[in-house]
Image (tube, coloured by chain):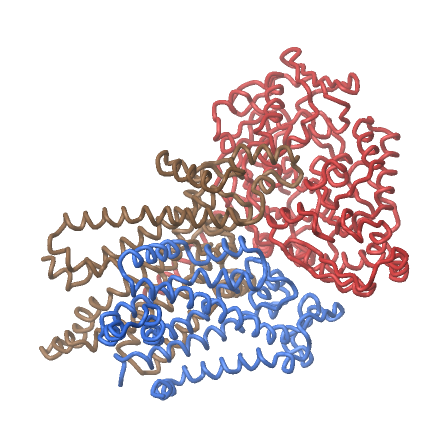
Amino acid sequence: MKRFTKLALLAAVFAVFTGMCAGAALAKDTLIVANIYDAKTLDPIATNEVATSGMCLHVYDNLLSLGADGAPVPQLAEKYEIIDNLTYKFNLRKGVKFHNGEEMKAADVKYTFERAKSPAGASIRQYVDDINTVEVIDDYTVVFKMKRPFTPFLMALTHTCGSILNKKAVEAAGDNYGMNPVGTGPFKFKSWAKGDRITLERNEEYWGKKPAFKTLVMRAIPEATNRTIELESGAIDIAYQITTNDLKRVQENPKLALMRVVDNSTTYMGLNCSKAPFDNPKVRKAVSLALDTVGIQKAVWRGVGKAPVAPIAPNILYAIKDAKPHVQDVEAAKKLLAEAGVKLPLNVQIWTNERKERIDMATIIQSQLEEVGIKAEIKVLEWGAYLDGLKQKTHDMFILGWVASVPDPEFAVSGVFHSSMVGSTNFSYFVNPDVDKMMEQGKALPNGPEREKLYKDLQEKIDSLTPWVYLHNDEQICGTQKNIKGFQPSPRGYHVLTNVSFE
Amino acid sequence: MEVWHRMKRSPMAVIGLVLIIVLFVMALFANVIAPFTYSKQNLVHAFESPSSKYIFGTDEFGRDIFSRIVYGARISLQVGFIAVGISMFIGGFLGALAGYYGGKIDNVIMRIMDVLLSIPSILLAIAIAASLGPGLFNLMIAVGISAIPNYARIVRGSVLSIRGQEFVEAAKAVGSSDLRIIFKHIIPNCTAPIIVQATLGVATAILTAAGLSFIGLGIQPPIPEWGAMLSSGRSYIRDYPYMTLFPGLAIMITILALNFVGDGLRDALDPKLKR
Amino acid sequence: MGFFCAPAFFEEGWKRMLKYIFRRILSLIPVLIGVTFIVFSLLYLTPGDPARMVLGDQATEEAVTDFRIKEGLDDPFIVQFARYVYKAAFKGDIGRSYVTKRPVSDEILSAFPSTIKLAAFSVIIAICLGIPFGIISAIKQYSLFDSITMFFALVGLSMPVFWLGLLLILLFSVRLGWFPSSGFDTFSAMVLPSVALSAQVIAIVTRMTRSSMLEVIRSDYIRTARAKGQTEGKVIWRHALGNALIPIVTIVGLQFGHLLGGAILTESIFSIPGVGRLMVEAIKMRDYPLVQGGVLYVAVAFSVVNLLVDLLYAFVDPRIKAQYR
C-alpha cells in the first residue's frame, strides 16, 4: 500500500513537471485565452451569442469591420459607396483566398447574405431582414438594395452574421458546417474539444497583416475563480470576464495587467406599463426616485461598470453620456405616489432570474422601496421560466438586461420600447405612438446631426416616461500577462486577438 | 427497548443522536438562539471576519452567518424529513402493493422503479426541479420523488418475505380486506429496515437539496439554505473562505450525525450482529 | 437482481448465459421507453420556450414561431413522443442539438470520455485505498485503527462533494499551487477532481469491504479452513478475501455506474467538459433533444454496467463457479 502511494505521488510530481515544461516551451508561439463559455458553433449565423462571435471573428472576415473608434471600416470590401438611401455598392478586394484555396468573389457575398436571410439565420434575422436583394455586378462588385431605408446596415455588416462564407465549403459540409468552418480570416480552424477548447492556426496566406503567433487556443472555463487562478499560475495568457471579486487581485499582481471597457449592455428594472398602478407615469417616476441607483450599483458591483444615465449604453452611437447622475429623492417619490392616489402599502413583486448580482440588486431595491411604502416580494425564476412568465403580462417589476449586439442606437431601443415588440422583447409593455414614430424615423435617417438629435430627444422622452429604472452598464474586464501587447477589449463583449504579440 | 440499549453501546451512535437533538433544538428555537434575523442587511458590516459579535462572520450583505446557519437548520430538517416522507409513503405504498399482489402489478411497479433508477438521481432531481420551478417546497418534491425506488424495493422485499406466513393466511381467512392486511400487518413488519433507510435517506435528501441549491435551482432569497449559502460564498472563497467553511461544516456535521445514528440503528436492529 | 438467477442457469453453461444476456438487453427496451417517456413529460411540463432560449433574446417573434413549427413543438404531446420514439428506434436518429445543430450522439460522445476518465480514476483511487483499509479494519476489528478508519469513512461519506472540491482548490491550487483547478487534459488536472469525487466512494468501499470481510471471517467456511490448520495469512488471503470480494465488486460497479451518470457538481466546480455538465446546460437551455439523448445514453451506460457487474458476480462467486464446473 505504502509503495503504491509513493509511486503515485512520484508519478504525479513528474506529470506536473512535464506539464509545466511543455507549457513553457509552447508559450511564445501559442496564445492561450480563457473565456467563460465555449462557442456553440462556428457557423456565423446559427446563433447570436458572444463566445461564438469571438471565434468567428478570427476565422472569418466581413465586408466591413468595426474600427478602433467604433465606426465601420473596410475589410473585405476595399471601398464602398452609398448610392442612395436604399442602395449600397461594394468593391471587393481581389485575390483574397479562403482557407480551402478558393478565391473570394461576389458570388460568395451574395450566397452569404441570402443564407443569412434563410431559415438557417433565424437568430440574426433582425439584422438582415431589411435587405431586399444582393446583386452581383461582376466578380468583385456587389450591390445591396434595401426594402426600406435602413441606416444601421453598415454597422450590421460588421456583426458576426456578416462573416463572408464560401459557398462551396458550406454546401459541401451541409449540416456539419458548424464544425468545419472555412473563412478568409487570419486564423484557420484546427480542432475542437467540445466544451473544453478550440484550437486555431495562423493562416499563412492571409491577405492582411498576419498574426505574430502561430496558434490560438480558446479555453472554456466557466468558473470565474478558476479563470483567475489559471491566469495567476501562468497557464493562460488572457482571461476574459474577470469578476468583481478578483479585480483587485489581478490589479495588484505585478505579473498581470488589467484591461477594461464599458460594454453595450444595460441592466434595468422594467415596470409593467400595462398593469396598474404602473400604467401611471407618475408612479413609475416615484419608483425611480425612491431608489438610490448609484448606491445600489456601487454596493453590488463594487467598482465594476457604472450606473447608467440613459437607456442607451454609453459606447453606442448617439448615447447620452453627459447627463447628471441619478439622484434619489425619497420625499419627492412619496409625494408623487400620493398625487397618483396609490393606496399604501402597495404590494408588488420583483421578478428576476438566478443571476447573483440581479438577486442582490433586487434585495437592496426591496429594502429601499419599503421606505416609500412599497412592499416588494422578490421572485427568483429560472431563466426559461422567467422568459415564459414575462409573456403572461402579470408581473409588476422585473430585472433584465438588454444588449445591442450591433452597436447602432436602433438596436439599442426598438427591441425594448417599440409597441410591436410587446411580449416578445418589450416586456415593460411600453406603448407610446410618439416614441414609436421617433424610432421608425431614426432607423431611416442617415447618420449625421439630425439623427443624433433625434436619438437624444428620444432618450430624453423615454426617460420622462420612466418605463425603466436603469441599474447597471457592465464592463468587459480582461486580465492578461504583463508581456501581452496589442490587446484591447471591445464593448461588444468579444475581442480581437489578431494584433496580440508577446513582448 | 432493546434496540435502545443496543444503540447506547455504540459511542458514535450516541454522539450522533446528541447532535441530531442539538439540531432539532436549533431549528425549533432558532429565533431565541440566533442573535440576528437571517435577512437583516447591514451593508456597512459586510464581509466581516468571525468576531465576538458575529461568531461566524458576515456575508456580502452584512448578514450574520451564524444566525443564518441556525435558521438554516430549520430549512434543512424540513427538506430532509418532508422529502423522505414523500419517498417513504409513496415508495413504501407502491412497494407494498407490488410485494403483496405480485404478478402483473409487481412487474409493472418494479419496471417503473427500474426506469426511475436508470436516471441518475441528481439529474432526475434537477429535471423535476426545473419543471416545477423554484421554491423550497418544489425542492422537497423533486428530492423526494427521486428517492422513491429505494423505499419501494425495501418494502417489497419485506412484504415478500412475510407474505406467505401464517398470520397473513389467518387474516385472509377471517375476511380482512387486502388493504387492511397491508396496513395492519405487513407494513409494521417492515419498519426496521425502513427506519434505517429513512435515517440515511434524510442525510441524502439534505445533501441532494444542498447540491441543487448549489447549482442554483431557485431557493428564493433570502432563505438561508446551507447549500445556497455555500453557492453564494463560492465566489468569495479566496478572500473570505469562512463564508463557505461554516455552511459546509454545518452540512457535514448534520450528515455525519445522521449517518452515525443510521449505522447505530442498523447494527442494533440487525439480528445477525447479536453479540 | 440478476445474480439470484445465476446459480440456477449456469448449470447449462455458455448457451444459457448468452440467452440471459439477450434477455437482459431485451428487458432494457421497455426501460428505455419508460425513461424517454418520463424525461419527455418532464420537459413538456417545464416552462420555458426552447425556441426563445436558442435563438436568443434579441431574435424576432417571427423567427421564434418558425423555429417552433420546424421542430414540431406545438404538436400534441403524443405526436411528439411517438415521432421521437419512431425516429430513435427505427432510424437510430436521436436528433440534433437545438443549440449547436450537431447530432446529439456526437455531442454526448465528445463529453463521455471526460466523464469516464473521472469516474474511472475515482473508482481506482477508491479501490486502492478502500479495500486495503477495509481488510485491515476487519482483521483488527474493534482496534484503534478500526475505529479511526470507520470514523474517517463516515466523514468521507458525509462530506458534500462540492464543498470538498472547493476546499481542495483552495488548498492545493490557490495556496500551494500544486495542481490546476480546471480543465482535464493533463494528469495533474485530473488529480483534484478525482480525489474530491472519490471521497464518498472510498468511504463506501471501505465500509463494504470491512463488513463483507467480517461476515466471511465469521463463517463456517473459514472456521473449517482454520481448523484444518491453514496459516492465518492463507486463511485471509485465499479463502476470506475471495468470498468477500463479491459484494465489493457489486458495490464498486454500482458506484462506477452512478458516477457515469455525471458527477455534475464535480464537473461544474472543476470546469470538466463531461456529460453531467452537458446535461445541466442542456436543461437550462431547454435543448430538448440533447437532454433526451443524454438521459438515454446514461440509462444505457448504467444498465450495461449493471449487467457486467451481475455477470462478473456470477463468475467470481465460487459457489456458482463450482456448480458451473
The residue shown at (74%, 67%) is B43
Q: Which colour is chain B painted? A: blue
- Rendering coords of residue C10 (x, y %): 14, 55
Q: Is residue C172 visible?
A: no
Residue extending farthest top: A138
Q: What is the quadrant of the C terminus of chain B in the image? A: bottom left
Q: Is residue A117 visible?
A: yes
Q: What is the quadrant of the N terminus of chain B in the image? A: bottom left
The residue shown at (42%, 39%) is C82
Give A153 or B164, whichever is nearer the viewer: B164
Give B54 or B146, whichever is nearer the viewer: B146
Q: Looking at the image, is C204 positioned above or below residue C43? A: below
- Rendering coords of residue B40 (x, y %): 71, 71
Q: Which chain is brown?
A: C
Give A199 or A173, whichever is nearer the viewer: A173
Locate residue A452: give its quadrant.
Answer: top right
Q: How many marks?
A: 0
Q: Is residue A422 left or right of residue A3?
A: right
The residue shown at (20%, 67%) is C243
Q: Looking at the image, is A365 positioned above or below residue B72? A: above
Q: Which chain is red?
A: A
- Rendering coords of residue A137 (x, y %): 66, 11
Q: Is residue A329 left or right of residue A237?
A: right
- Rendering coords of residue C244 (x, y %): 23, 68
Q: Looking at the image, is C17 positioned above or below residue A154? A: below
